[in-house]
Amino acid sequence: MSKDVAMSSPADRNASTDGVIVIDHLVKTFGSVRAVDDLSFTVRPGRVTGFLGPNGAGKTTTLRILLGLVAPTAGTATIGGTTYGQVTPPMRAVGAALEAASFHPGRSALDHLRVYAPQAGVSDARCREVLAFVGLDTVAGRRAGGFSLGMRQRLALATTLLGDPPVLLLDEPANGLDPEGIAWLRLLLRHLAAEGRTVLVSSHVLSEVEQTVDDVVIIARGRLVHSSSLAELASLAEPSVRVRSPNAAGLVALITAAGWADRVEPAVVGQPGVAVIHRVTAPEIGARAFAAGLELHELVPRDVGLEGIFLRLVGEDAGVEVAEPHLEAGAAR
Amino acid sequence: MNAALRTEYRKLVTTRLWWILLLSMAAYMAFLAGIMAFALTQDPASLTGGVPGADPAAPMTPEAVARTIYTLATSLGYVFPVIVGAMAMTSEFRHQTITPTLLAEPSRTVFLTAKMLSSVPVGLLFGVVGTAATVGAGAGVLALLGKPAYLTDPIVLRSAALSVLALTVWTVVGVGFGALVTSQVAVIVIMLAFTQFVEPILRIVMGLFDWSEGISKYLPGAAGEAITGSSLYAGSGMAAGLLPSWLGFVTLLGYAIVFALIGRLTTLRHDIT
């Protein structure tokens, strides 16, 4: 990656900015609400970074500050060492799609791109090219007002790609896409990152992007709660095991003797002979049960999953951790 | 700036609004010109007879009648270019395209300037079509009635040409007003109420008193008419006379610039959320 920002030609994608996004002690208050509260993190090129947090965590505000649409109360947000718009034309430096589906409903998909083409410094042919790239070439002449949410997402993505920028900022791009569309988006984002681009994707659901992202930045209530690679996030997972025994009293005795009483999940306490025990592995329980001569009918390690870690980190774990495994997928939606 | 201009121009011409309004204006202007050509040549006093305190209505000369008809678009039809200009700005906020707009052009001053300048060719088109509709229908009815149409009179033609200029400036005023009041519904309601109702009444009422007569000439509609040098209101004796043509131009353009400046310092200084 070249650091030579000012001298590079616009056509040389990787040289126009070094592509590192730096959020540094960023603060934004709306009245008495601290929407972004002393937030700092870094996003690197060549990787897909998930920008995660529950709705209202401050993701969109952070992105809008980064894009110069909202003025920060304090701190800085830079892309490639400069604030947005310093590298011109901006559409060649950064491609951004924010959550609001921002189309004039009476304008056709192709005309929507043609409107921005002069500012991206590209031809009508490039507009058709990106439209085909996102799979909208067959509806190029149709007005965007009649598009489904998934088609709008594709058109928004086409707009960001118009100037072939080295940095992509996408706010909830998977929202409204069908499973096929999500799989397509995943491949596309991985491909764009593999080309050396910086790809920042926001989402309020980790499971939506966990197969796409390399790194995660997790915020809640405007503050950073976690920033690492996805692998490091996974290492935060705590083991948890479901145990069932025909000898309910024996199971309680075993748990008490092992000192695990405070690790038993409350929701299944009421079911005699069944317990879900956290922060203990199946072999540990199995060994103790064997030693105590306790008959076990189930000894099932439960996959907490990244979503569980995510929800615990953002402080919304209560609702899901007590749910039965088959309900978790639904609760995390 | 060049790219911003091309972008803003493409925005204007890639939706249906402009030609729907253009056709509406052409039809409305042709209708009014036909009616007025008939009314003004039949009984000019009937237009003013009911206004108390006004000078006794002097019959308009045939030349003044022709000029009044050929500049009707400036007197009664300017609401169309104003709305086209205003909606160019308000639709950005209504459809939230202001976000991608400012991503593509982060300088809000460049954006607003490009928006105003890009409306000029569209305004010219409205001016040409609106004026042509009044001249076409007006001259047609005058000819049918056996009255002189003055289509070769340089003063009459100059008024018609200046009507094109006035309507163009009105489009820019619309863009400025849209930057000031970004709500589409509010803009349309204010525009229709002010141009079709409030200002005509203000001009007539203010024209009745010495102290307010001079001020009424600086109302935007009066300034627009002044550009052409002909006025339905003044010519028929309903309102005060007109400013000189150049001062009318400066005054109307002044409205556009003041609206835009206030819009730049309010709407376009705020966070775009």
Image (cartoon, helix red, strand yellow):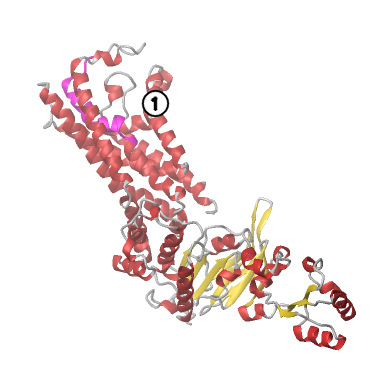
A117, above or below B243, in the image: below
Report how many numbered discs are placed on residues in the image.
Answer: 1
Q: Amino acid at mark 1?
A: Phe
Q: Read off the residue under disc 1.
A: B197
How would you classify the magenta stretch by its main secondary structure? helix
Give, as a single range, the part of the protein colored magenta.
B58-79
Which residue appears farthest toward the left when viewing the image? B146
Q: Quadrant of residue A37?
A: bottom right
- The answer to whether one can see residue A48 in this image is yes
Screen quadrant of the C terminus of chain A: bottom right
- Whether residue B73 appears in magenta in the rendering, the answer is yes
Write down the chain letter for disc 1: B
At 33% across and 47% down in the image, what residue appears? B119
Q: Position of residue A30 (x, y in %)?
A: 64, 53
Q: Position of residue A279 (x, y in %)?
A: 77, 78
A323, above or below B200, in the image: below
Q: Position of residue B272 (x, y in %)?
A: 52, 54
Q: Quadrant of residue A181?
A: bottom left
Circle 1: element type: helix
Q: Is residue B135 left or right of residue A47?
A: left
At 38% across and 55% down in the image, what residue appears? A144
- Whether residue B123 appears in magenta in the rendering, the answer is no
